[in-house]
Amino acid sequence: MRLVINNVVLFLGILCLYLSFSPPINAADGNNPLVAQACEKVKAKDLCISSLMAEHASKSADLAMLALISIKVASNNGTNTSFYIKKTLDTKKLEPAVEQNFQDCEDNYISATQQLDGAVSSLVSKNYKDTKMFLESAIDDAITCDNGLRKMPGNQLELPHRNIMFRQLCINALDVVLFLTTS
């Protein structure tokens, strides 16, 4: 009898876990029409839509939540790129000029992720002016890194491509926030 009860409890636990991670039943295709609206005026529209739709929370999000998600997507990308930079500096023998550019970009990414944290806090408190300022600062950090990378000999490393993606995600987040503030 005890075995049956344990199996029922286990089954119910697994069922609850499955239902908590599955999409809502009433979502016909799982797409949130606000995602397309929020990304409508963004330069990298496809990237905006795909990055937001990749986040489960976007499926039922309002515009403010989509703005928050877009910042978090950029922040996660920035954090991953920062780890890539650190790992490259720690494990690869780089030419002195390349190493210096990576170190400069590492500083830029530390600053950029701090700016994105500030953008999240400002957005949550509905201080859109500061949110915009923090996002613009993160974009400036990415541009500064990019400027150093353009001078770098041998752009065969992955960082220039990662930096372009990060900068575009930050620009997308800014555009979504601007859409939020004008809606």
Image (cartoon, rainbow, N blue to C red):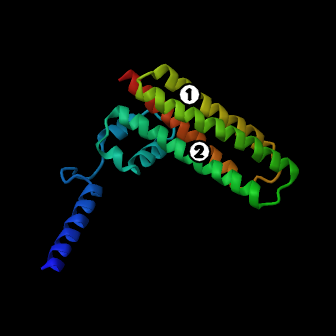
Query: Residue 159 location in percent, x, y?
Result: 69, 51
What is the x, y in percent for residue 58? 35, 44
Tell me, yes or no, whether the two marked residues, 2 and 1, touch with CB atoms within 8 Å. no
Considering the numbered disc 1 on the image, is that residue within a helix, a strand or a loop?
Answer: helix
The crowding category of the residue bearing disc 2, from other C-alpha atoms within 10 Å (few below 14, some 14 to 19, many at least 20), is many
Which element carries disc 2, helix, strand or loop? helix
The extreme right residue here reads: 96
Q: Residue at x 21, y 70 (%)?
A: 11
The image quarter containing residue 6 is bottom left
Residue 84 in view here: yes
Question: What is the quadrant of the N terminus in the image?
Answer: bottom left
Of the residues shown, which amino acid type is indicated by label 2? Gly
The residue under the point 76% across, 41% down is 104
Q: Is residue 133 left or right of residue 67?
A: right
Q: Is residue 163 left or right of residue 157?
A: left
Residue 143 screen position, x and y as percent:
68, 35
Real-space Cα distance between discs 2 and 1?
A: 14 Å
Of label 2 and label 1, which has the lower sequence position?
Answer: 2
Q: Which amino acid type is shown beneath numbered disc 1?
A: Phe
Rendered residue at 81%/42% (across/down): 151
Residue 39 in view: no
Q: Quadrant of residue 2?
A: bottom left
- Please say if 69 is above or below 7: above
Which residue matches tag 2? 78
Q: Is residue 112 above or below residue 79?
A: above
Residue sitting nearer the eye, 77 or 161: 77
Q: Quadrant of the C terminus?
A: top left
The residue singled out by tag 1 in the image is: 134
Across and down, in percent, residue 28 comes to: 21, 52
Q: Quadrant of residue 93?
A: bottom right
Q: Which mark is residue 42?
A: none
